[in-house]
Image (cartoon, helix red, strand yellow):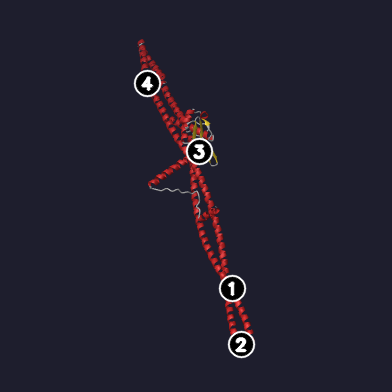
Amino acid sequence: MEEKTRRLMEDALSKEPRFTETHAAGGSQQSPPESGEAGPAQVDETFRRIQVRFQDMLSSIEESVKSAQPSVDSSIEATFKTISASLQAAGLGVFGAKAARMMKEEIHKSFSVDLLLRPVLAAIAECRSEIDDMISKTARGTSRRLGQSQIRLQAKAVQMYSRIVEQEKQLEVAVAHVRKWRQRVAELEEQLEAQRTQASHMDAEISRLRETMRSMSDEVEARNETITRLEGDLAKAASQIEQQKALLAELGSAEEMMRSFERMSMELANAQGRLKEAEERVAQKDAMVQYMREEMARMEDERAAMDARLNKLNDEVIAANARAGSVAEEAKALKLEVDELKARWSLLFSVAEDEPSFQAYFLLADKKSNWLPISHLSSALGIPSVRLKLQMEKFVETGLVEIDGDRIRARNISDAARELAGSDARLVEEMKASLEETGSVTLEAFDITEPPLDEDDTEREADDK
């Protein structure tokens, strides 16, 4: 009997719930089954079958006990036939036959199945009563526990779905951050490449200026040698003039002395003119050399600033790559959590899809927040309107459903998710405020919505404005 009872329970509870899933871009939507029995109804039906089975087994036992009466009667008849034949053979005659009948009647009364098995039949009746009481109590307790479990599952399913929506939004934000950081890294790499190209051009310009300065220094040295040579020629001319003056004095010829003086004067004037021109060219070359030196010093400063800028850009690229990697890891973790929440939601949906209240909610969700009369919904589900309204109260309390008189509609799940996220944020802020008041810890928010801007980026934005 225990084996049959266990088998009946397994057959009744082995029915798996059926559900369908339709996937769309940005998430998954689940639709309720077309038909299905409620969990408490299945439990009641299972216990009813068990009770009927117990009643059938007790009835079979009772019928088997009662069916022993004809066998006992036939055994008594056969025995008394033998006794009567023995008494007649002993010669007792009518007295023997009468004694046999009296014994037969007494034995029939003593061996009556109703009398002998009355305790057994009473025990069977008592067992039937106890089984009925036990089955009814067990069914009520199981239905009550199942209802409580379904309520908890419903609340958990709503929370899981809201969490899935929130995690998907966080995943989208994290992906946007990753794209933004990657774009920022690409811009920094382009700036770094441009700075390197400009640095190479400046190195070439510095080399050219050094070569020009070297050639001009050679030319200045050549000019200095020319000036030295001209000064020597001028000294020779002055010495010749002195000699001519001495010669004129010795000769005493004024005319010859005048011509010689004029000739020497012209040569001296020419030499002085060439010396002045050479001095001017030397001054120009000195000014050019000084300009070249200043230009080289300026370009050396620009090169040092460019090297510092390159080092800074390299540091920014390294920091941006590290930050992009951390954001990518965070996005990957969020995606894994969203996948896990989707799997949990599917399992919870498979458990709760046969509930009339969930069927009602899924029908409302398919209406896209349109109002629907409660009477129409109760007719579609085969549930009284009052009972349906009571069952939907928990959905109203969780913010999934709105009821306006005799109308009902499903709220947008995004609004419910935002309200849940707002309540979580308020709870976090309250905890932060309480912790900061106690002075035990100070919580600071870290924002990753925007990449850091360096000084040049700030200056460029100011120029653009």
Q: Amino acid at mark 2?
A: Leu
Q: Residue at x 54, y 39 (%)?
A: 23
In the picture as drawn, the residue positioned furthest to the front comes out as 254
User: Are discs 2 and 4 less than 8 Å apart at CB?
Assistant: no
Nearest the viewer among 107 and 201 is 201
Q: Provide the residue designation for mark 2.
A: 248
Q: Pointer 1 and pointer 4: residues touching (CB < 8 Å)?
A: no
Which residue bears the numbered disc 3? 413
Residues 27 and 315: in front is 315
Q: Position of residue 238 (x, y in %)?
A: 58, 82
Q: Which residue is mark 4?
A: 118
Q: Earlier in the sequence, mark 3 or mark 4?
A: 4
Foreground disc of the pair 3, 4: 3
Residue 280 disc label: 1
User: Which of pointers 2 and 3 lies earlier in the amino acid sequence?
Assistant: 2
Check disc 3 and report its element: helix, strand or loop: helix
